[in-house]
Image (spheres, grey):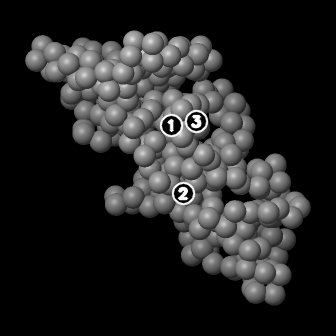
Amino acid sequence: MEILRTLLIKLFLICCFAINGTSQEKIEIENRIEALNSINEIKVKLHPLVWNQIQKFSKRKSFPKTMGLAKFYFPLFKTKLKLYDLPEELKYLTIVESNLKTRATSKVGAQGLWQFMRPTGKSLGLYENQYINLFNDPVASTDAACRYLKQLYTQLGDWELALAAYNCGIGRIKRILKKTGKTTFWEIIQYLPEETRLYVPSFLAVQFLMNYYSDFGIKPYTFAIRYSDVRLNKAESDMRIDRSSFTNQREKNIFMFLNPHLKTLYIPKGTYYYSIKKPAIVDSRLILN
């Protein structure tokens, strides 16, 4: 344990030198973190693992696109998180989980923006049939994620532990806490699966990077559609969308982007779907989600 602590301290010092170059630059970074932590419930730490993840995410070629998508999806997330009295910064979890790809599917079968596994998603009311997949529905999956995150926090009383449980399961986290007698994520990090060890640092890194992206020379894509431009519709009868429903390919792309939960262009009676209230200019690079 002492050896691990010593190695982490050494790594921290190395990272600080690499990050800062000068003590003044270190002070500036610390000031940024302090400013961020003054308004957020989930605090960012200048830890070597966090900084490594900041470097990793900042170098992703897809990150400018992700930031453009964030401008669209984050108002939805903010509304839902506020409804459940949850920290707004939890919206950044979707970047760690899916890079804001609504149809993302992991190697182990987790789906959607919030990457729900089948059993967990079904327990929260998500389902899939031959026509729709609610795991891919931004609204339904976000509501499910809010309820699930609230459950985890209620049981663990700590957001870093709740996030770790979101990744590897609350049962495993509870067993580790009981076995070790520890109470924080950083105290049990060496007992966690490798993926989970980086999961919380990744979340904290994204939280920092999304607020200070300009320091890294990142320029977000422009995304003209706002979530407030989206209208929720309910099919009053069975509907079949075909080529004649769209005046051009762009309109079809927008429709498919707004409705990732639709598996076909057949919409059964009673199914909810989304459309644009008014015409919008869309960066086509963001539609191929």
Tag 2–tag 1 contact (CB < 8 Å): no
- Kind of residue sitting beneath label 1: Phe
Q: Residues within 10 Å of mark 3 (few under 14, many from 20)?
A: few
The image's mark for residue 214 is 3
Q: Earlier in the sequence, mark 2 or mark 3?
A: 2
Q: Is residue 118 visible?
A: no
Say which label, 2 or 1, has the lower sequence index: 2
For the N terminus, the image quarter is top left
Q: Residue furthest left?
A: 3
In the picture, the disc for residue 216 is 1
**Mark number for residue 101?**
2
Report the amino acid beneath label 2: Lys
Secondary structure of residue under mark 2: loop
Q: Is residue 4 left or right of residue 99?
A: left
Q: Is residue 280 above or below residue 117?
A: below
Residue 144 position in % (x across, y down) = 58, 45
Q: Position of residue 179 (x, y in %)?
A: 20, 21
Q: Extreme front residue here? A: 22
Image x and y of residue 246, in percent: 80, 80
Q: Quadrant of residue 38?
A: top right
- Label 2 vs label 3: CA separation? 23 Å
Nearest the eye: 153 or 27: 27
Q: CB under 8 Å between callouts 1 and 3?
A: yes
